Amino acid sequence: MFFVKSTDTLAVDLPISSKVSSLKNYINGHVPSCSQVLTFQGKVLDDSCTLQDYGVSVDSTIHLSCRLLGGESKKVKRCDLDGCNDKAAKIVGDCRYCSKAYCSRHRLPEAHLCTELKTCKQEKYNLNSSKLMDQKCVASKV
């Protein structure tokens, strides 16, 4: 018999030759096995090894803790232009035509050769020409 300690102590009656994964399944009622972290003498126990491999003996205490969620560092946005590894400029670095992020050197559509720029220019040209045609004065002939 050995003990598993978390907030309370649980007496476990498994053979020492059993695997760590079977111990996790045994205490699955308290904490789900996917979030369990078992440590013995400062070492994290691997699921594929046996308890005997870590030197667990009768009346030993194994500590149970839970995995923490998160902790991954926030990824820095990089310039989407090939060959440029600079940090993307916040707010002003987002191209409104192709919806990609660019650094301060490539943030203008002309600088990163935006593929949507020609279609955008054509749309604006057509819009302006239709407005001008609507406002065109036609002189009546007498």
Image (spheres, helix red, strand yellow):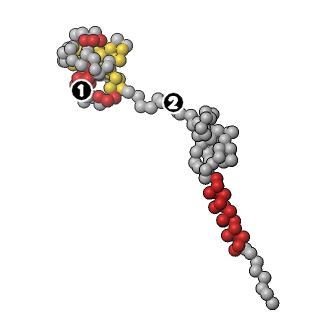
Sequence-wise, the earlier of marks 2 and 1 is 1
Crowding around mark 2 (Cα neighbors within 10 Å: few <14, some 14 to 19, many 20+) is few
Camera-side residue of 22 and 100: 100
Q: Amino acid at mark 2?
A: Ser
Q: Dot 1: what SS?
A: helix
Task: Report the residue at 25% width, 30% height from top.
Answer: 29
**Horizontal relation, residue 33 to residue 139: left or right:** left
Q: Position of residue 134 (x, y in %)?
A: 69, 74
Q: Are marks 2 and 1 in contact (CB under 8 Å)?
A: no
Q: Position of residue 66 (x, y in %)?
A: 36, 26
Q: Position of residue 21 (x, y in %)?
A: 26, 23
Task: Report the residue at 37% width, 13% height from top.
Answer: 42
Task: Report the residue at 68% width, 47% height from top.
Answer: 110
Q: Which mark is residue 79?
A: none
Crowding around mark 1 (Cα neighbors within 10 Å: few <14, some 14 to 19, many 20+) is few
Q: Quadrant of residue 30?
A: top left
Q: Position of residue 32 (x, y in %)?
A: 29, 30
Q: Does residue 3 sit above or below 102 in this rendering? A: above
Q: Dot 2: what SS?
A: loop
The reply to whether residue 107 is in sight is no
Q: Quadrant of residue 83?
A: top right
Kindly report the distance in space between the C-alpha atoms of the residues bearing marks 2 and 1: 31 Å
Q: Amino acid at mark 1?
A: Asn
Quarter placement of the N terminus: top left
**Horizontal relation, residue 58 to residue 86: left or right:** left
The residue labelled by disc 2 is: 73
Image label count: 2
Q: Does residue 12 sit above or below 122 in this rendering? A: above
Task: Report the residue at 28% width, 20% height from top.
Answer: 48
The reply to whether residue 73 is in sight is yes
Q: Residue furthest right?
A: 142
The residue labelled by disc 1 is: 25
